[in-house]
Every structure is written in C-alpha cells, then in structure tokens.
Image (cartoon, rainbow, N blue to C red):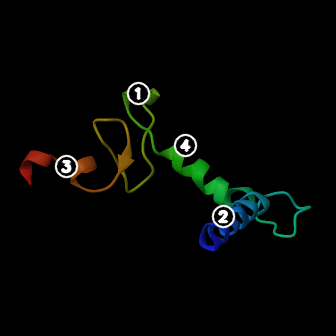
C-alpha cells in the first residue's frame, strides 16, 4: 500500500516538473523552447518521418531514410538487410 502511494507521488512529481519546465518565463525554471523536454519530443517527431509518405521530406544530416519512411542509422535504415 505504501509502495504504490510512493510510486504515485513520484509519478505525479515527475509529471508536474515535466509540465512546469517550459519556455514560459513566468515559471521558476525557464528554458528556451527547443531545449524543453516537450520541445525535444517535438523535434524527434518532426524529424522522424521521411520519403514519399511525407512529400519527399529528407532526414537530418547523418541519418538515412528507411523504406518504411522513418529516419535512423544502421543497416535497417541505410543498408541492405540481406547483405548482413
């Protein structure tokens, strides 16, 4: 019982901090928009899709576009899996 209560409290605190660390200068923790946790998640989602499914969008430098339309590194994105 105590263990689940402590876990719930930790999860609530993590959620509170995640939502309060933002680009809003009125909050005690101010970060530029692209440096917030939610901003980083936005960047990951924005840059993760590529190819014909996205109208020809290309991956960031150093990443390859897999046949399924997602950016990444390694043979599943950049090379022939049959060659392994």
The mark lying in front, picked from 2 and 3, is 2
The circle on residue 53 is: 1
The location of residue 3, given as percent across then percent down, is 60, 72
Whether residues under marks 4 and 2 lie with C-beta atoms below 8 angstroms apart, the answer is no
Q: Earlier in the sequence, mark 2 or mark 3?
A: 2
Q: CA distance from mark 4 to mark 2?
A: 31 Å
Residue at mark 4: 46
Dot 2: within a 10 Å radius of its alpha carbon, few (fewer than 14), some, or many (20 or more) residues?
few
Q: CA distance from mark 1 to mark 2?
A: 40 Å
Q: Earlier in the sequence, mark 3 or mark 4?
A: 4
SS at mark 1? Answer: helix
Dot 1: within a 10 Å radius of its alpha carbon, few (fewer than 14), some, or many (20 or more) residues?
few
Q: How many marks?
A: 4
The circle on residue 68 is: none
> Residue drawn 74% across and 65% down?
17
SS at mark 2? Answer: helix
Whether residues under marks 2 and 3 lie with C-beta atoms below 8 angstroms apart, the answer is no
Q: Earlier in the sequence, mark 4 or mark 2?
A: 2
Residue at mark 3: 79
The location of residue 68, given as percent across then percent down, is 31, 35
Residue at mark 2: 8
Quadrant of the frame with the N terminus: bottom right
> For this rendering, which residue is in front, 15 or 60?
15
């Amino acid at each position: 019982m105590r263990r689940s209560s402590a876990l719930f409290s930790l999860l609530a605190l993590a959620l509170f901090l995640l939502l309060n660390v933002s680009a809003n200068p009125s909050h005690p923790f101010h970060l530029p928009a692209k440096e917030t946790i939610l901003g980083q998640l936005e960047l990951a989602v924005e840059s993760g899709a590529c190819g014909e499914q996205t109208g020809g969008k290309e991956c960031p430098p150093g990443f390859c576009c897999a046949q399924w339309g997602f950016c990444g590194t390694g043979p599943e994105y950049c090379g022939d899996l049959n060659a392994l």
